[in-house]
Structure formats: C-alpha cells, structure tokens
Amino acid sequence: MTNMYAVTDPATGEVAATHPTATDTDIDAALGSATQAFRAWSKVSTLEERVALLHRVADLHNERVDELAEIIHREMGKPVADAAGEVEFCAAIYAYYAENAERFLADEPIDLLDGEGHALVRRQAIGPLLGVMPWNYPYYQVARFAAPNLALGNTIVLKHAPQCPESAAALEQLFLDAGFPEGAYVNVYATNEQVADMIADPRILGVSFTGSERAGAAIAETAGRNLKKVVLELGGSDPFVVLSTDDLDATVEAAIGARLENAGQACNAGKRFIVADALYEPFVEKLTTAVLAAADGLAPLSSVAAAERLEEQVQRAVADGATLATEGKREGAWFPPGVLTGLSPTSDAAREELFGPVATVYRAASEDEAIALANDTTYGLGSYVFTTDPEQAMRVANQIEAGMVFVNGVGLDGVELPFGGIKRSGFGRELGRYGIEEFANKKLIRVAN
C-alpha cells in the first residue's frame, strides 16, 4: 500500500504522519458497509431518531472544537482561531438540519386538476452517496454535504483530500461516537482511480464533489456515463464591484476580508475588484496599503505546490502587462500578498482563478462596463456589489451571472442560505432547504379515491 495520504505541516514542510491508501478490498468493504447501513438502518430509522443523532454531532463539534481545530492547523495551515470558527460553523449546520428537517421533508400535497382522490410528493432517501471533498475547509465542506443527507436517510462514503487524513478520520470517529451505526458515514483513503470505480459501482446512487474545475469535469463525466446524479461546487473568480460608497475605508476593509479570508484560498473569495472610475485611484491606494500590511498576520498557503502554482500565475500576469505591488518573495508555502493592476481582462492570465492572497483590480467607466467585466469569466460562483443606491444594487445584482450575489457586505454566508454556482463553477446547491433536495427521491403518491 502507498502513502498518498500524509499530514505535511505547510509552515515547516515537515511530514508529521502518513496513512496508507485504501486497498480495493477496503473500498469494497466501505461500499458494502454503507449499503448495509442504508438497508438496515436508514430505511427503518425515523426522522426523529436521525435528527437526534445530528444534534449529538453538533454537540460533539462544539465539545471537540480545540482538538479538531488543531488537526486542520497541522494539515493545511489554517490559524487555530479560524479553524475553531470553522468547527463551530459546522456545529450550526448540523443543528440547523436537525431542527428543520421535519419541515423540509413534510409531505407536499398537490391540487388535482381533475379526478377524485388526492396526491402528494414525499421526499425520501435514495441510498449511499459518495462525497469527494477538498482541503481548504476540511470540516465545513463535509458538513454541508453530510448534514442534510444523513437527516434525509442517505448514507455517506467520504473521500477527503490526501492532505487531510487526520481530520477525515476524526470526523468518521465523531459520527460513530454520536451514535450513528457502522456504515452510515464511512471514510476512505481512496485514489482517483478508486473514486472512478466507486462512482461506477451500482451501490453508489449519487456523488457530491467540491474542488477544481478539472477534477469536477472528470467526476461529472464518470457520473454521467453511469447515470448518477452529481452536485459540483468548483472554482470561482468572483467579482467585487464597487460603484459608490460613503465610507471608502469600510469598503476597502470589506474587500480585504473578501480576498484574504483563509489566506485567499476560498472558491467564493472576492478575486477580481471592479471599481468605478471616480473611486479607482483612492481604492487601489488604500487596498494596496492594507494588503501589504496584512503580510505579517497571514498564514501559509496549504502546501508548497499551491504556492508555486500561484507564483507561476502571478509571473504570467506580469508578463501579460500587469503591475504587481508586493513585498518579499515566496518562501516555501509562505506567499506574500499583493495587488495586480493594469491586467487586460482579455489576457489568458485574467481568465484564471488565483487561489491565494493576490487581488486583481480593474477600472470601470460605467455601470454597464462594470457588469460586463463582472460577467466576463467562465466562472459563476459568488459576487459582491457595493453601492449607496438601493435601486442600482438590485439592478446590478439581477444582471450578474453568478449563483450568489452579496450586496454591501462580506462574510454573509449562513446555514440557511443556498450555496452554489453556475457556468463552470458547477451546479446544484448546498445548505438551506435546497441542500436537502439534491439527493432526495421526490416520490409522487396519487390515490384514486
């Protein structure tokens, strides 16, 4: 067995632990366990029983917050305080579905147009699901997939990122400790080839993937060939549109939060700052000052490879005509934050997602040009609009091609709000009511009399 799964501290490059990759026998056993749990537990358990277990999962996240936070600090470099915040948000997600599942899953009556009797739609579980999750939010990404589906009665086989083996194991143990039966939530240290085999396996009924566009396309292709429902949350190059403000300092502070949260390693981070002509110069000046000042408190990127990739992208942007304002240079996984200006939006470098603490700023001569720049991307995950004009805010939000628009604020995500994108950012939704609908059999029951 190989050791593809390893804990490598990005701050030091030290390999702290390795975990053997699953054998094909291990994978078969995991699928068998999830299938047996679905047949023996999910189909006979009551909603009341399942939500009680989810409440316990929420409690255990809060009880183990320090332990869980320290694990992902080692695995992907997230500051401990931020990691603890992620764990607590996960607790809120599990509690949210525990508290609202009964309402979300209530029978939906249908008014008949003709004939006697009655009809309804009943939402039921479909079976074992495969989740393939990334490293940037090791607990949160799992929570928004697992919480609604376990409430519904589906079972989960979870393949985590190779650099997150300890958090993956900690979650599996947490579900067992909460009282879920063996097989309801199963962790597998699978290879990409084994993932493809699991998608093709008839025991898996659906797939949820969060990660890169390239990997998502491969997952969707395999799922499509095997007629499996898939939810994809992929990359983003989210526009942050500034049209007017009565407090430029506060707007820049929001921009910093949108760009540098998790060291810039968030799919829905503000990445392209599109600023009205009248505000462009002072915005760039203040943003650059704030970005450079943030260097001392910034965490390393998740790995040396991630930092090398970002460095190569920034160098190509500069070669394409951009001006880079930064201080220092990359050292291992540590990447100095910076601001790119003067990059043509039609250049190849402008088409890429920069996954790290580098902001790109564009000037817009009008509202229409700002909207055109915002939409000039293959991605469509999130977006931000800042304006003092409420009518303009709704007008622009209506025209932005994205799954989410946040007006005059950042960090406004909530457990009750649907999360997802369009275009090459994927499809399907997580969180809120929509998150429990994706892998539900919306079964029609019509009674003649």
Image (cartoon, grey):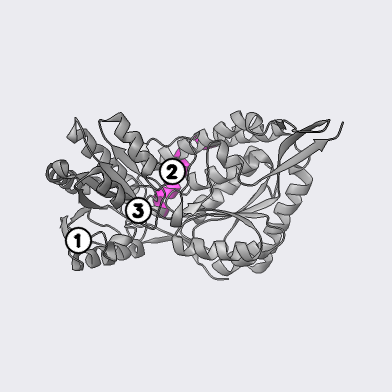
Residue 26 in view, yes or no:
no
The answer for how far apart the CA atoms under marks 3 and 2 are is: 28 Å
Q: Residue at x 33, y 61 (%)?
A: 352
Give the amino acid type for the residue marked by disc 2 in the picture: Ala
Q: Residues within 10 Å of mark 1 (few under 14, many from 20)?
A: few
Residue on which disc 3 sits: 237
Is residue 235 placed above or below 282 in the rendered structure?
below
| Rendering coords of residue 269 (x, y %) | 35, 47
- Quadrant (top left/top right/bottom left/bottom right) for the C terminus: top right
Where does the magenta region start and end? 61-75
Q: Position of residue 122 (x, y in %)?
A: 72, 37
Q: Residue furthest right?
A: 449
Residue 74 lies in magenta, yes or no? Answer: yes
In three-dimensional space, the C-alpha distance between marks 2 and 1, rounded to whole angstroms, equals 29 Å
Marked residue nearer the N-terminal end (3 or 2): 2
Residue 162 placement, left or right of 121: left
1 part of magenta stretch:
no
Residue 4, given in percent of the width and then of the height, sits at 50, 67
Mark 2: few/some/many CA within 10 Å (<14, 14-19, 20+): many
In the picture, the quarter occupied by the N terminus is: bottom right
Tell me which amino acid carries mark 1: Lys
Reading the image, the residue beneath label 1 is 329
For label 2, the residue is: 69
